[in-house]
């Protein structure tokens, strides 16, 4: 609706926080008056008067009000709101989608765990936020490519190869690999020669040594099967997993490219660097280490080049933690300098915050103590099973518990703004009465159950959405005077769903969608607790409203990657 309104008005309106200030509001009068040195209130009043004569606007807007120093507030017409409710009933799971991103491609780099390490809680945010962004962009009609940039290359593999060879471990598992890595660092503290040995092994790997490649491949295979198990549990599906190792050839080509070579200089200690001071970045990008080995940054540059060529994206999003901010500043600047992507390609680092332990301190990942994601998921499912008892029933069946447990973990992550840290808190995550995944899923199940009850006793739900006129008891000669406050608030909220999705996408912030869904669910529950639905004299309308709310909650949760059990 905002789009439509903007077009008719010729200026942009904002959605309002407070329903007393209308559905949309604008400060054009304030801005305009300031520029011309006029009285803003007067400018607003004049504009209001003019707008009230606009026939096209009159079809959408019921009332225009001037508020405060000169804001202009617009209240939507009730039949526009009711028509939207009918539209939800006919568009169903497509409601909120659009073709905004037609002909545009977005590449999303997400999850990207490191080989030979267990999938820790550290990669959870990237996986969950990345997948939500993926779904949201798709819903808006973009061509979306998900790429799991696995950490499967780099000098750390030299360390592993050295350890595997010296320890001669017969069998490799993630646990063993992790242990070997930790042991390497312990031993290296007293034996400085080890680092050189590790570098040697990585050189062998980069040089294509068969034995090195074979052991490396085993490490990759062991890790991938663990990662796949986790992705399955999370319901995450990433289109590609080229991984860092894929870019060996691309990197070698870059090293020979005269256009790139002319930007390379020798830095301190003999490393090859790219100076980025002209971009305001003091730390140069390390392109090659002093022994000629490529770096994480070299691989990211090659990756950009590859992605630009393969998919011709208009945006590349890196769903990676804030601790890598400098790295991405360097990589983005260097990519521009070297001309690896077109000027119009946006490069975005979302820079998400960390998970913190319940005491607010960092989860200790040093000394080999990683919080394994699988343990978190197991506990989430167990806790979810018990939630059934809390809502005065039996424990949830396993399928429901899985949906609720995993949903709780995902929602808890997504409800925090991307940039902020997340303090891990089981009680909040599982809270059936507050802003949580289980609360929203429970509200959907409540909507389902109302509709089901009505269906057994009355007519089937399909008939409810036929036309505006069928809302018996709500309308009288198009006046809809009988809508109560709770109903109005829900109708006004429902019409915003498509706009919320757009703003969540534009700011890479799935938490905006979470806020919206929580608000809508709370409005529904307030309505449910106060008014009769079945057997009320507005039963048809209230059932349609219930079904519309249920549908929008479902659409929103599915975009966030969260399942909605039919009943709970
Ligand atoms: N593997 C990296 C890590 O765990 C994340 C990779 C992110 N993506 C990228 N293109 N650098 O820290």
Image (cartoon, helix red, strand yellow):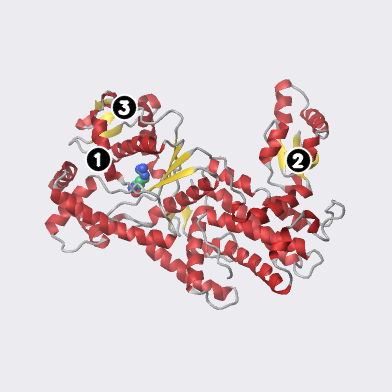
| Residue 34 can be seen, yes or no | yes
> What number is the disc on residue 490?
none
Q: Residue at x 73, y 69 (%)?
A: 459
- Between residue 99 and residue 41, name the one nearer to us: 99
Rate crowding at label 2 as few (under 14), some (14 to 19) or many (20 or more) other CA atoms within 10 Å. Answer: many
Residue 134, given in percent of the width and then of the height, sits at: 48, 48
Q: Is residue 137 above or below residue 415?
A: above
Q: Which residue is mark 3?
A: 275
54 to the left or right of 2 = right
Q: Is residue 331 above or below residue 370?
A: above
- Between residue 64 and residue 98, name the one nearer to us: 98
Q: Residue at x 71, y 50 (%)?
A: 84
Q: Which residue is mark 1?
A: 248
Residue 129, given in percent of the width and then of the height, sits at: 47, 50
131 to the left or right of 297 = right
> What number is the disc on residue 74?
2
Q: Secondary structure at mark 3?
A: loop
**Farthest residue in the right direction?**
477
Residue 249, given in percent of the width and then of the height, sits at: 24, 38
Quarter holding residue 317: top left
């Amino acid at each position: 609706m905002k789009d439509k309104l903007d077009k008719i008005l010729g200026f942009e309106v904002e959605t309002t926080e407070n329903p007393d200030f209308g559905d949309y509001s604008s400060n054009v009068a304030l801005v305009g008056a300031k520029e011309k040195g006029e009285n803003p209130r007067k400018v607003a009043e004049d504009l209001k008067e003019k707008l009230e004569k606009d026939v096209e606007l009159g079809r959408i807007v019921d009332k225009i009000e001037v508020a405060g120093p000169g804001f202009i507030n617009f209240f939507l017409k009730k039949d526009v709101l009711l028509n939207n409710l009918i539209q939800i009933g006919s568009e169903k799971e497509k409601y909120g989608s659009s073709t905004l991103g037609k002909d545009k491609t977005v590449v999303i780099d997400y999850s990207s765990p490191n080989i030979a390490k267990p999938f820790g809680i550290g990669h959870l945010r990237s996986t969950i936020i990345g997948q939500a962004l993926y779904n949201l962009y798709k819903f808006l009609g973009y061509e979306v490519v998900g790429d799991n940039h696995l950490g499967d290359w780099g000098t750390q593999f030299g360390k592993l190869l050295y350890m595997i060879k010296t320890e001669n471990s017969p069998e490799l598992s993630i646990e063993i690999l992790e242990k070997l890595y930790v042991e390497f660092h312990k031993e290296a503290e007293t034996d400085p020669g080890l680092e050189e040995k590790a570098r040697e092994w990585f050189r062998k790997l980069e040089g294509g040594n068969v034995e090195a490649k074979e052991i490396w491949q085993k490490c990759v295979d062991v890790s991938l099967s663990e990662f796949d198990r986790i992705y399955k549990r999370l319901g995450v599906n990433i289109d590609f997993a080229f991984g860092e190792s894929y870019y060996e050839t691309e990197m070698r080509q870059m090293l020979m490219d005269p256009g790139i070579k002319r930007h390379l200089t020798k830095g301190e200690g003999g490393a090859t660097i790219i100076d980025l001071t002209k971009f305001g970045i003091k730390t140069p990008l390390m392109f090659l280490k002093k022994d000629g080995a490529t770096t994480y940054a070299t691989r990211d540059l090659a990756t950009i080049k590859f992605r630009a060529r393969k998919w011709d994206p208009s945006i590349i999003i890196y769903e990676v933690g804030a601790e890598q901010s400098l790295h991405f500043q360097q990589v983005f600047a260097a990519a521009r300098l070297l001309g690896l992507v077109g000027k119009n390609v946006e490069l975005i680092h979302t820079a998400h915050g960390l998970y913190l332990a319940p005491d607010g301190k960092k989860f200790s990942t040093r000394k080999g103590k990683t919080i394994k994601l699988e343990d978190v998921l197991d506990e989430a499912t167990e806790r979810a099973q018990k939630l059934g008892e809390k809502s005065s029933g039996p424990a949830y069946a396993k399928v429901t518990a899985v949906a609720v447990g995993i949903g709780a973990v995902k929602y808890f992550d997504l409800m925090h703004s991307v940039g902020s840290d997340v303090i891990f808190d089981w009680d909040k995550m599982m809270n059936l009465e507050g802003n949580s995944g289980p609360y929203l899923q429970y509200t959907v199940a409540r909507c389902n159950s109302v509709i089901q009850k009505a269906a057994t006793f009355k007519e089937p739900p399909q008939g409810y959405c036929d036309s505006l006129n069928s809302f018996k008891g709500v309308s009288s000669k198009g006046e809809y005077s009988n809508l109560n406050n709770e109903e109005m608030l829900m109708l006004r909220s429902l019409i915003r769903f498509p706009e919320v999705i757009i703003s969540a996408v534009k700011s890479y912030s799935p938490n905006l969608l979470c806020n919206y869904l929580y608000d809508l669910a709370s409005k529904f529950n307030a309505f449910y607790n106060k008014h009769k639905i079945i057997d009320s004299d507005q039963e048809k309308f209230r059932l349609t409203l219930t079904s519309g709310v249920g549908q929008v909650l479902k659409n929103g949760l599915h975009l966030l990657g969260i399942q909605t059990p039919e009943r709970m």
